[in-house]
Amino acid sequence: MSENLHDIDKLFRDSLNGHEEMPSNKVWDALDNNLDKSNVIQIKRKYNNLKRIAVALLLLLMGTIIYEIQSKKTAKEEVVTNNGVDKNNGNDNKSGGGEQKVTTDKTNNNNGGVADNSNGTASGSREINSAGKDTATNAIINSGKETTQNTTAPQQGQEGNAVQNVDQKTLSGLKQKDKLKVKIKKPGVENDDDVANENTVLPQGNKLHLKKSADHKTKISIKNAAPTEDVNTDKNATVKSGTNKTVNANGDELRALQNEAIESIPAVLNKNEITTINAKRVSPDANVANGIAKSESTSNAKPFHFSVMPFYAPQFSFNRLEDDHRDPGPQPRNGREQIKEKEPHEKSSSFGVLVEIPVGKKWGLQSGFTVLNKEITIEPKNIFAKLDNDGKVKYRFDCSSGYTYISPKAGTTPVVGDSVVAVASSNTLQYVGIPLAVNYTFSMGKFNIIPAVGTSVNFLTRQKIETELVQGTSKEKQTISTIEGLKKTYFNAFAGIALEYNVNKRIAVNLTPTGNFALSSINKDAAVKSYPNSFGVAAGIKIKF
Amino acid sequence: MIAGLGAKKIFLTPPNHLTFTLHLNGIRIMQEQLNQLIQHCIKGERHSQSKLYALLAPKMFAICLRYSKNREEAEETLQEGFMKVFENLQQFKFAGSFEGWVRRIMVNCALQKFRGKSHLHAVVNIDDVKTEYGGTENISSQLGTKELLQMVQMLPSAYRMVFNLYVFEGMKHREIAEVLGISEGTSKSNLSDARAILKKAVVNSAQIAKQNTN
């Protein structure tokens, strides 16, 4: 009977094995059509990587554009303010006054009890009657208390006759309020009111603040009729004249005048102070520049230049599995389901350092590096001997990451179809990722809520399968460090909302629930395609610089 | 044992790149020429694809016919199989038999088709099957290949799958059980039933043929 059974197998095998039959033409027609469609899909797939790069570049470009817009906005504001000054200059120059004003504050400086123009000198716009004869020397002196000084001196042969008055009352008033105003008059000026050079010194800080605040006004006026010579720390200062000519003045000469003026300041300032003042003398331009820089940083309201945040994030992760139809090997029924069933536990965590660069007041760009560690526990299962890629018979171990062929060191060489039990198996993966994200900050007192969205490219750095093979009574541990089918990189997108508590100006504690979604699979040509997704909470400390 | 060797022949045919010759559809083609043809197909040249199809289709269609209950189903399987072949041609590493590789794809397609359907288990009363079967020599001469093919196609799909995998692909019951998601015992039982049905069919056909000749 048994012989007969084999005979029936043989009968069919012999008859049908070499059998050939031509299918109908419609099969090729349908194939032809489908291949056209497939070509379109393949072309789409071909450019998938390019698309991903394009998205990353787009994000980067967007960030840069936002940054540029914010920067230009700020710069524009400053230019507008300064343009107002230039216009004033132009007007004054046109009227023959030759006065140069650098005004960054439109508010009246009679604030905070500042005794401005106590001698009745108008603090607003002024008439200058010394056209053609005067050279205004404007020196802004930056001392520990912030002192600004104006010196007005005659230009042609009048230096020696310069009368320099310091308004004692003003000075004392300023001193009381930590402000100082020095006004120096010169002969030939019709009245005190016409002396227009004045500076208001800021009450606090060491620098000149050019801010639209009543308390923080700085006004620098240089009055002259002839081509203006500006006292500058540079030997040759360049100042626009009333006729829009650029004149290179000899700084030494002007500095001499300035020194003279300083020396004439009576006991209001002691000698040491004057020395300090003199030593720390800064050109108006420099001060204005400083002011602009300061103003820029304050008006832009960038909370910090950049921040660094080391973090650690335990994650709850899971793989989305898809059947890989590219793998031509005969697959067990429901391979995806089986792998899913055998890999219920997955431990993963990530750590790294994120650097954030603020772009404007609210927006920020985030990048850095992350290290993701994953360990997947695989439940005991039977693995079967198959031909490996080199034509040798080995046990094939399939998992969600890929597959590997295992050859037991002990025991007999397996034949196709033999099986062993793989117990206590685990699959370990490590990726180093480079994220790029855009975030937006909602500030609420000491708390910030920062939603962020971005993408990351992840590079495989470690791969391992550990298993114990049980064959009869013998047990054998195997560690495989190369998993077939595993790709070197994969992309993922992430979104999260950070809750941040500012401990102080520099340090903030950050807690970020984040969801990660794989954009591409981590493997190909394996039993299944795996798309790792995860949800985790990153805890970190942000240090702002 | 013979089945096991058969499996090796199907899946593991060792290639000899220099001397290996394919006989496809009566066309003799050298391995080197075939490799060139494959390369052209990878580039997406439709002419080469059609040539490759013409070379392999008859043989593959015969396989599909064995796994299907009728010609239409076989053509569907063949079409799907060839689509996969062309889509994944770049995965072929030129390290084994190309024909074997294509054949595996066809078998997988047939299995996928089988898995995708809900199956009604055939109830076969084995007692009804009477075997008066002595040998194959006379019968094979009396029965044509097409008749035998039809017999296989007539089998319930689960039986047909097990019979094909065991007899033609050389798989063991353990592997069949794994591939079809059934128990090893079911696989053995299905094979036994399939054989019984086929035997009966063969005997009946042989008797009819004998009567006709008389």
Image (spheres, coloured by chain):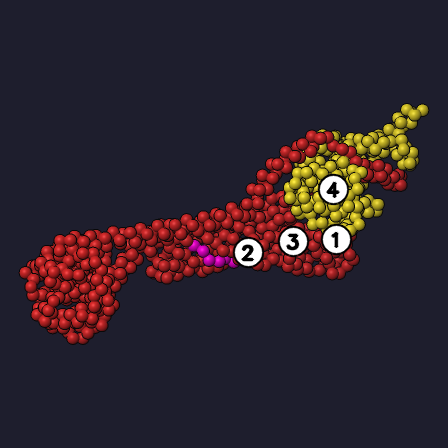
Chain colours: A red, B yellow
Look at the numbered disc 3 and give the secondary structure of its residue.
Answer: loop
Amino acid type at circle 1 is Gly
Q: CA distance from mark 4 to mark 2?
A: 36 Å
Q: Quadrant of residue B38?
A: top right
Identity of the residue drawn at 52% across and 53% down: A457
Kindly identify which chain the residue marked by label 4 belongs to: B
Amino acid type at circle 3 is Glu
Look at the numbered disc 1 and give the secondary structure of its residue.
Answer: loop
Q: CA distance from mark 3 to mark 4?
A: 23 Å
- Mark on residue A391? 1
**Residue bearing the label numbered 2:** A459
Q: Quadrant of residue A198?
A: bottom left
Q: CA distance from mark 4 to mark 1?
A: 17 Å
Look at the numbered disc 4 and give the secondary structure of its residue.
Answer: helix
Relative to A140, is B147 above or below?
above
Amino acid type at circle 4 is Arg
Identity of the residue drawn at 24% across and 69% down: A235
**Residue bearing the label numbered 4:** B103
What span is colored magenta in the figure?
A366-373
The quadrant of the image that shows the N terminus of chain A is: top right
> Is A454 displayed left or right of A231 in the figure?
right
Identity of the residue drawn at 62% across and 58% down: A464
Q: Earlier in the sequence, mark 2 or mark 1?
A: 1
Q: Are marks 3 and 1 in contact (CB under 8 Å)?
A: no
Q: CA distance from mark 3 to mark 1?
A: 15 Å
Q: Residues within 10 Å of mark 2 (few under 14, many from 20)?
A: some
Amino acid type at circle 2 is Phe
Q: Residues within 10 Å of mark 3 (few under 14, many from 20)?
A: some
